Amino acid sequence: QVQLVESGGGLVQPGGSLRLSCAASGRIFGISTSTMGWYRQAPGKQRELVATITSGGSTNYADSVKGRFTISRDNVKNTVYLQMNSLKPEDTAVYYCNLNLWRKDYWGQGTQVTVSS
């Protein structure tokens, strides 16, 4: 089995920052060649892509977070990060870590991010 454990969510004021982490463990042979990413789901909305990063470090961002969020990964620790700056109320959502390994998607349990004054 594959386990993805997220951490780092919480309550932050508009303009603030948070850093999310997602550590992968279990049957993750080949993870260094995989794509990892972050998605989010706000109440009443569909899950949407936030950012992805390939094994080679190529990144892709949703237009709504470009210039504010940065995705990175540590292939030694099997961990992906999401640095979120200049947070806005519309960034409020449950954030999910994703691992695409051998063409199969794995998901974390989600971590709540709330941006509010």
Image (cartoon, helix red, strand yellow):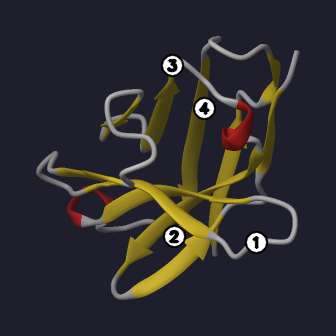
- The mark nearer the N terminus, 4 or 1, is 4
Residue nearest the viewer, comparing 43 with 4: 43
Q: Secondary structure at mark 2?
A: loop
Three-letter amino acid code at disc 2? Answer: Arg
Q: Which numbered disc, 3 or 2, marks the residue closer to the eye?
A: 3
Q: Position of residue 79 (x, y in %)?
A: 46, 40
Asked if the residues shown at circle 2 and circle 1 are in contact, with their CB atoms under 8 angstroms apart, the answer is no
Give the structural element (helix, strand or loop) at label 3. loop
29 up-or-down from 75: above or below: below
Disc 3: which residue: 85
The residue pinned by badge 4 equals 20
How far apart are labels 3 and 2 at the CA level? 33 Å
* Nearer-the-camera pick, 59 or 74: 59
Rendered residue at 57%/74% (across/down) = 106
| Horizontal relation, residue 75 to residue 40: left or right | left
Measured Cα–Cα span from mark 4 to mark 1: 21 Å
Of callouts 4 and 2, the N-terminal one:
4
Measured in 3D between alpha carbons, the distance from the residue under mark 2 to the one under mark 1, in whole angstroms, is 32 Å
**Which residue is denoted by mark 2 in the rendering?**
27
Q: Residues within 10 Å of mark 3 (few under 14, many from 20)?
A: some
First in residue order: circle 2 vs circle 1? 2
Q: Could you tell me residue 96's position as x and y percent?
A: 65, 57
Residue position for label 1: 45
